[in-house]
């Protein structure tokens, strides 16, 4: 049974760049980018989700968070349809050194898979350019 998944993501920015994980869809052979975050657990606020996910994924503490809005994201990944309600935040990483790294290594604990997060300029996204998810974020 397919279900709608509530998630929370955070846009960490410096100058005109944002921190995004680099993903790959084997079905479409498409590289895409998405801000860091993850699934909201039962009884957990979306703000707490951001703080927990950043600690789990990149071992980083989050300072101030600002709520930006909500997006509905319907997509297909590796041939499987998905549907998410995405709580979107703007945030600050307490570890200022992370803003200077070109790449940040992370781990997706649920599936024990490592990932790479990169700082990408907003100019790199848009029609005919790198793909940024969820749709409507840009």
Image (cartoon, helix red, strand yellow):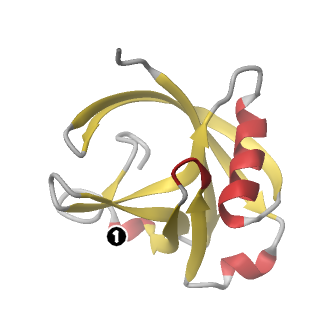
Q: Residue 16, image x and y in percent?
A: 53, 70
Q: Residue at 42% across / 18% down in the picture?
A: 3
Residue bearing mark 1: 124
Q: Residue at 23% across / 46% down in the picture?
A: 78
Q: Residue 26, image x and y in percent?
A: 21, 57
Residue 8 found in image quarter: top right
Q: Residue furthest top?
A: 1
Q: In this view, does 108 lie above or below 43?
A: below
Q: Alpha-carbon neighbours of circle 1 within 10 Å: few (<14), some, or many (≥20)? A: few
* Total numbered circles: 1
* Helix, strand or loop status at disc 1: helix
Q: Residue at 70% across / 45% down in the picture?
A: 50
Q: Residue 43, image x and y in percent?
A: 77, 20
Q: In the displayed structure, does residue 33 sit left or right of residue 80?
A: right
Q: In this view, does 42 lie above or below 126?
A: above
Viewer-proximal residue among 102 and 79? 79
Looking at the rendered image, the quarter that the N terminus falls into is top left
Viewer-proximal residue among 109 and 83? 109
Q: Residue 106, image x and y in percent?
A: 59, 67
Q: Residue at 38% across / 39% down in the picture?
A: 136
Q: In the displayed structure, does residue 23 sit left or right of residue 116?
A: left
């Amino acid at each position: 049974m397919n279900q709608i998944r509530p998630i929370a993501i955070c846009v960490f920015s410096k100058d005109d760049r944002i921190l995004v994980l680099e993903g790959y869809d084997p079905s479409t052979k498409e590289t895409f980018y998405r801000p860091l975050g993850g699934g909201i657990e039962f009884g957990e606020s979306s703000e707490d989700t951001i703080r927990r996910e950043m600690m789990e994924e990149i071992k980083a503490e989050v300072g101030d968070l600002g709520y930006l809005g909500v997006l509905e994201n319907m997509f297909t990944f590796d041939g499987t349809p998905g549907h998410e309600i995405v709580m979107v935040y703007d945030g600050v990483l307490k570890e200022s050194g992370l803003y200077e790294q070109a790449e940040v290594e992370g781990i997706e604990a649920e599936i024990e898979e490592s990932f790479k997060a990169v700082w990408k300029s907003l100019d790199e996204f848009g029609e005919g350019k790198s793909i940024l998810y969820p749709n409507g974020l840009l």
